[in-house]
Image (cartoon, rainbow, N blue to C red):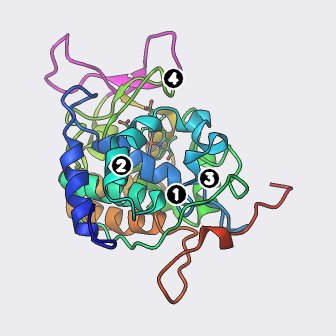
Amino acid sequence: MSQPGDFDAVRKDIIAVLKQPKYDDGSAGPVLVRLAWHASGTYCKETDTGGSNGAGMRYEAEGGDPANAGLQHARVFLEPIKEKHSWITYADLWTLAGVVAIQAMGGPEIQWKPGRTDFVDDSLLPPRGRLPDAAQAADHLRHIFYRMGFNDQEIVALSGAHNLGRCHADRSGFEGPWVNSPTRFSNQYYKLLLKLQWKPKKWDGNFQYAAKAPGADDDDEELMMLPTDYALIQDDKFRPWVQKYAEDRDLFFSDFAKVFAKLIELGVYRDETGIARADKMKKVPSEY
Ligand code: CCH
């Protein structure tokens, strides 16, 4: 147990939980980043509903959404931290874990503010279907991310999180990592998008792109791109940002830090005490 508000103690324990020799590529970091993103990415600016406040994924309606398959691993990694620092809300813990993991994996420092509260029941959950579908293309990315209030540059910057982690056939139906060092934050994803010869993967699973990394041996794992990743180089407005971020790592790091900070603040409105009451959030209108 730490003093309520001692977020540095929580940060330390998040760092301690990152190393997981038996899990994926040896780190819980990527799946923690995905948890923070999926907690936040349900936001709709028109109805002002969804977002990370509330920690709705604890309930079946949101946590059991096929789009969130696999994120129970992230929540299980964090459970001992919640038990030890019981004063922190899940909504704060999940977003804090994302930013701590990114920095610990060599990424930028990202501004994080506390104050989120947790839903007490499932009456305010956002509907399913608000997270992106990887089988689709640029128009779908715009539909999903404009709804949250992001622009084209921000969509490309956010997508750079696919420098981290991998796809799991039993979670999403896609398979493999985007880059060779999936636990090291970098701009490699953009470089590989532009540089490698991406071809449809020969397999019975979902349509995805595959390529061998330069100099890879036959038994080295193939790299992958989702249709939505590939859409970033097919689209005239997205592609220049992919090129910029491939050439300029520092620009990517600073833009990513800004846009991730914006993502985890979506729908989080604090009162003068600094607390964002989940019970004051709007109900999703029935036509949505
Ligand atoms: Fe993503 N992502 N993501 N993604 N994602 C997947 C994994 C990760 C899409 C689809 C998928 C963002 C945007 C998109 C991460 C962070 C972000 C997987 C594999 C799919 C599919 C899941 C599995 O099988 O385990 C689509 C579509 C979009 C549209 O833009 C954004 C934005 C972020 C964060 C800023 C991370 C990290 C992972 C790796 C997770 C892991 O378990 O290794």
Quadrant for the C terminus in the image: bottom right
Residue at image position (28%, 44%) is 29
Mark 2 burial class by Cα count in 10 Å: few <14, some 14-19, many 20+: many
* Helix, strand or loop status at disc 1: helix
Q: Magenta stretch? A: 197-223
Task: Residue at the far right: name it.
Answer: 287
SS at circle 3 = helix
> Relative to the observer, which residue lies in front, 137 or 172?
172
Mark 1, residues whose alpha carbon is within 10 Å: few (<14), some, or many (≥20)?
Answer: many
Residue 235, numbered circle: none
| 213 vs 36, nearest the viewer | 36
Q: Is residue 159 left or right of residue 100?
A: right
- For the point 18% across and 29% down, which residue is it? 21
Mark 2 and mark 3: Cα distance apart in space? 17 Å
Against 218, residue 277 (above or below) is below
- Report if the beta carbon of the residue with label 2 is closer than 8 angstroms to ligand 1: yes
Left of 259 or right of it: where is 55?
A: right
Sequence-first disc among 2 and 3: 3
